[in-house]
Image (spheres, helix red, strand yellow):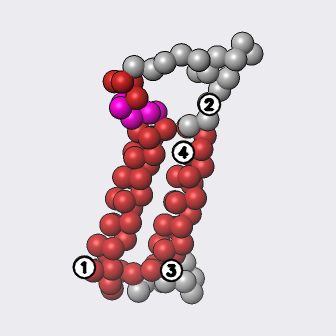
């Protein structure tokens, strides 16, 4: 087992950086939805998808975006090990 130096421990890892990046993408999507609720509620009452109004469709879209971003995070953070046991 090798010891890691102090600067390496304090530096955020790859998974942390990816997680924060995806978090900020979701925050932007969420605040876009909230901005529509606050400033343009008339837009959300429109029904472009048959009987479903845009508020419901965009709310479901936020849920789908959260699921998609979690899959992206899972794939991006997967640790690939070579046959020799080394991690890449």
Q: Earlier in the sequence, mark 1 or mark 2?
A: 1
What span is colored magenta in the figure? 10-14
Q: Pointers 3 and 4 in contact (CB under 8 A)?
A: no
Q: Secondary structure at mark 4?
A: helix
Q: Earlier in the sequence, mark 1 or mark 4?
A: 1
Asked if residue 21 shows in the view, the reply is yes
Residue plotted at (57% across, 87% down): 51
Report the disc number at residue 39: 1
Label 2 sits on residue: 79
Label 3 sits on residue: 56
Give the main secondary structure, helix, strand or loop, of the magenta stretch.
loop
Q: Position of residue 60 (x, y in %)?
A: 54, 72
Please name which of the two marks, 2 or 3, marks the residue nearer to the observer.
2
Q: Position of residue 4 (x, y in %)?
A: 45, 20
CA gap, disc 3 and disc 4 = 26 Å
Residue plotted at (49% across, 66% down): 62
Report the disc number at residue 73: 4
Q: Secondary structure at mark 1?
A: helix
CA gap, disc 3 and disc 1 = 17 Å
Q: Position of residue 55 (x, y in %)?
A: 45, 80
Asked if residue 48 shows in the view, the reply is no
Please name which of the two marks, 3 or 4, marks the residue nearer to the observer.
4
């Amino acid at each position: 087992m090798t010891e890691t130096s102090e600067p390496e421990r304090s530096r955020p890892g790859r998974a942390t950086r990816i997680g924060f990046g995806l978090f900020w993408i979701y925050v932007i999507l969420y605040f876009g939805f909230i901005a529509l609720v606050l400033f343009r509620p008339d837009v959300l009452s429109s029904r472009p998808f048959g009987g479903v109004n845009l508020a419901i469709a965009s709310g479901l879209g936020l849920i789908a975006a959260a699921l998609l971003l979690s899959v992206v995070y899972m794939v991006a953070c997967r640790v690939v090990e070579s046959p020799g046991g080394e991690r890449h």
